Amino acid sequence: MNLFISRVGRMCSVIACSIALLVTNAGCGSNAPVHENLPPCARALGYRGTLPLRSALPETDWPTDDDGSWLDRPVPPPLGALLESRLQSVLAQTGAPGATVAIGGPGLGLWQRSLGLARTAPRVVADDASLFWWASVGKAYTAVLVLQSVQQAKLSLDQPVSTWWPHFPEGRHITIAHLLNHTGGLNAAEFTAPPDAIYQPPEALVARAQANGSLFCPGAYWRYSNTGYIMLGRALELTEGMSYAELLQQHVFAPLGLTHSTVIDHAPPPVGLVTPHPGNQPVDDAARATPFAAGSIAARADDVVRFWQALLTGKLLPTSTVRASFATLYPMFNATDDHYGRGVMVKEWTDTRGRSRRWLAHQGGHPGTNALVAYDPMLHVYVAVALNSDVSAVATSNVLLQTLETWRAAAAP
């Protein structure tokens, strides 16, 4: 497994950091200084991080010529056979129990497979009914709901969290926009990893953050916060008068025809939900519903590709709103190759051929779970991968994209 992960170098270090954050929110290279006794802030501040914001994305990064018709067509059979062979090789090489994968784009069609095991002991085979956990990829879904509510004037990006939590530290200055891009300054130790994990309701996590105070004045720095997205989910519920799961069903799943997507509620777990395998050992995680609006989506990979394509092409939000989500991009984890917007990420690296590459993406992780959805502007291809193990979804996605690019070159006249 280590050899496989090393093939994509530093790209994978961010997955490890994301896993740690989903478990503890420990900072993991946050560009925010820690203030144990922060004096009251007079106002929100402009960004003061040591690393600069990323410049605007070029026009060529946007899938402007994508009508989505390819989503209902299969890829050419030789390509499908090659992708399946490579995915089987990845599972065999890494020891990952199972994966759900989808890849495709205009002119190609869509290929989807769920292979391997949903659980190793007792043995349960993964199939098309299996639902894999996407962890923090779910933040992109929450951001869509929030921005839809903003479009309908039910919420405002500059609305303070004191609207719902009047005693929250700096709550008059922390806004919806701050929560979306992780610049609210929240201080929260959030989730416990299995086998000691227990379910924690959203109210308890928000109360813990309220008791802990703030780390910095809102807007000044970037620090990943699951609790911020949990607060967004609760703000949605209180504003809309519906549960988070109902909101997703009504505004995302149903309009897009996503029949293999659901939300992991406290109990019982969704039918077909696969088991996480930290260290490639099956572990029943009683706390998978704890992330709530910070990452509780369970789905098949083709549904996640359909969601991502709909987001980037203006089917869920106005195109101007989508582009605004990528307009201000904060450096993640003291790195210069990963940036965060409003519920979206931009991942950059140099590939083995020396080419500068970029993905419009979101990734997620938790012990025994790894996930990524991305659009590759250079290849004009979407990819979504979730594994029920600690094997890198970033690396797996890269292998599949390399396979597709090699097939394209061989098939070209």
Image (cartoon, rainbow, N blue to C red):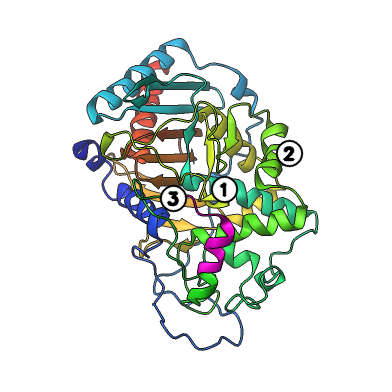
- Name the residue rendered at 39%, 46% in the picture: 366
**Earlier along the polypeptide chain: callout 3 or callout 2?**
3
- Count of numbered marks: 3
Q: CA distance from mark 2 to mark 1?
A: 16 Å
Q: Nearer the viewer, residue 388 or 69?
A: 388
Residue topped by disc 1: 140
Query: Which percent across, then down, holds residue 82?
Result: 36, 16
Left/right placement of residue 289 relative to residue 358 reads: right
Q: Is residue 295 visible?
A: yes
Q: Secondary structure at mark 3?
A: loop
Quarter of the figure that contains the C terminus: top left
Q: Secondary structure at mark 2?
A: helix
**Rendered image: mark on residue 17:** none
- Name the residue rendered at 51%, 68% in the picture: 208
185 is higher (above) or lower (below) than 345: below
390 is higher (above) or lower (below) than 108: below
Residue topped by disc 3: 198
**Earlier along the polypeptide chain: callout 2 or callout 1?**
1
Query: What range is drawn magenta here?
Result: 198-208
- Give the foreground label among 2 and 1: 2
Disc 2 to disc 1: CB gap under 8 Å: no
Amino acid on which disc 3 is placed: Ile
Query: Which percent across, then down, holds residue 200?
Result: 50, 54
Left/right placement of residue 368 relative to residue 47 reads: left
**Main secondary structure found in the magenta portion:** helix
**Rendered image: mark on residue 250:** 2
